Image: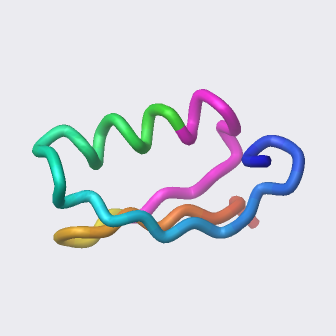
Amino acid sequence: MLKAFAPKLAICTYHYPDDPELLEKIILDINPNYCIRHTKSKLFAMMKN
């Protein structure tokens, strides 16, 4: 799904301390064309323009 359709993502990242880094790595390993933005407790990802 991430590689073929590249949906916009909004993911909560407050459950474990390493969630932001781990989730970013997983997303970018699957599709390196995502642009990722972090807030205090969420990760947003969308395709680069």
Q: Could you tell me which residue is drawn at 31 percent across and 68 percent down?
A: 42
Quadrant position of residue 46: bottom right
Q: Could you tell me which residue is drawn at 17 percent across and 70 percent down?
A: 40
Q: What is the tally of numbered marks visible in this picture? A: 0
**Residue 26 position within the rendered picture, expressed as x and y whole percent measured from the top left:** 50, 33
Q: Could you tell me which residue is drawn at 69 percent across and 38 percent down?
A: 31
Range of magenta residues: 27-37
Quadrant position of residue 37: bottom left
Residue that sits furthest to the right in the current view: 4
**Residue 35 position within the rendered picture, expressed as x and y whole percent measured from the top left:** 57, 57
Q: Could you tell me which residue is drawn at 19 percent across and 38 percent down?
A: 18
Tell whether 47 sits left or right of 38: right
- In the displayed structure, would residue 22 be above or below residue 8? above
**Residue 29 position within the rendered picture, expressed as x and y whole percent measured from the top left:** 59, 28
- Say which quadrant the C terminus sits in: bottom right
Tell whether 10 sits left or right of 20: right
Residue that sits furthest to the top in the current view: 29
Foreground: 20 or 35? 20
